[in-house]
Amino acid sequence: QKEVEQDPGPLSVPEGAIVSLNCTYSNSAFQYFMWYRQYSRKGPELLMYTYSSGNKEDGRFTAQVDKSSKYISLFIRDSQPSDSATYLCAMSGNQFYFGTGTSLTVIP
Amino acid sequence: GAVVSQHPSWVICKSGTSVKIECRSLDFQATTMFWYRQFPKQSLMLMATSNEGSKATYEQGVEKDKFLINHASLTLSTLTVTSAHPEDSSFYICSAQKTGTAQETQYFGPGTRLLVL
């Protein structure tokens, strides 16, 4: 079983839609949870990070962590074409693990 | 901010030559830097963890004599692909961890695209 599972998509939504991106994991020792955004041919950019369970909000982005279910989510409200990218979840305890990334396209 | 640069951004070289890629943390110190490789439409593959002043730790299956890593200062790590071959063509990305923080704050460089002819 992989440490981190993420649906690769692709996911295509109309502009203004609410986007939900998710990852599941198997290691209960993970304490830090991150979402990165990667545009084509660029390095990943840290969007959100959360320690332990709970929600964190930053503008149109909300990150949720449910440690009891080993499930994390990233919500994007009022999605924009500029949000089109690959979104990588990542988590760490003693080591750092990435999901495979979900490709998102927001259609104008 | 936390800015990480990489140089060069892209490189084309002949098979058998060596290529050096630099990773710099511009506005913070990084005790630890990471080197990743990414193939098209695939996730990041950790190649090695680079610690300032000590030897790098390589992931299983990564040849340390092929991918030489040097982390000589708190702001610079280099990856040298020795005797490059076409199968080494890939997107190489480094990340830097801010000194004194936990692993969650990795900041990535923009990546270096390597094409070996």
Image (cartoon, coloured by chain):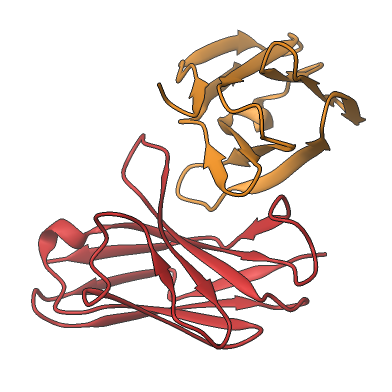
Chain colours: A orange, B red
Query: Considering only vertical position in the picture, is A59 above or below A36?
Result: above
Taking the image as shown, residue A82 lies to the left or right of residue A77, namely left
Q: Residue A99's spot in the image, x, y percent? A: 51, 31
Q: Does residue B28 appear left or right of residue B68 in this picture?
A: right
Q: Is residue A12 above or below residue A32?
A: above
Side (left or right) of B83 relative to A34: left
Please report the residue visible at 90 percent of the width from the left and 28 percent of the height from the top: A57
Q: Residue at x 66, y 56 (%)?
A: B106
Q: How many marks?
A: 0
Residue A99 falls left or right of residue A76 = left
Q: Above or below — where is A14 with respect to B49?
A: above
- Residue B65: image x %, image y %? 22, 77
Residue at left offset 60%, top offset 78%: B24
Dividing the picture into quadrants, the one containing residue B29 is bottom right
Q: Nearer the viewer, residue B88 or B105?
A: B105
- At which x and y percent is residue B9? 44, 69
Q: Name the residue: 81% across, 17% down.
A: A77
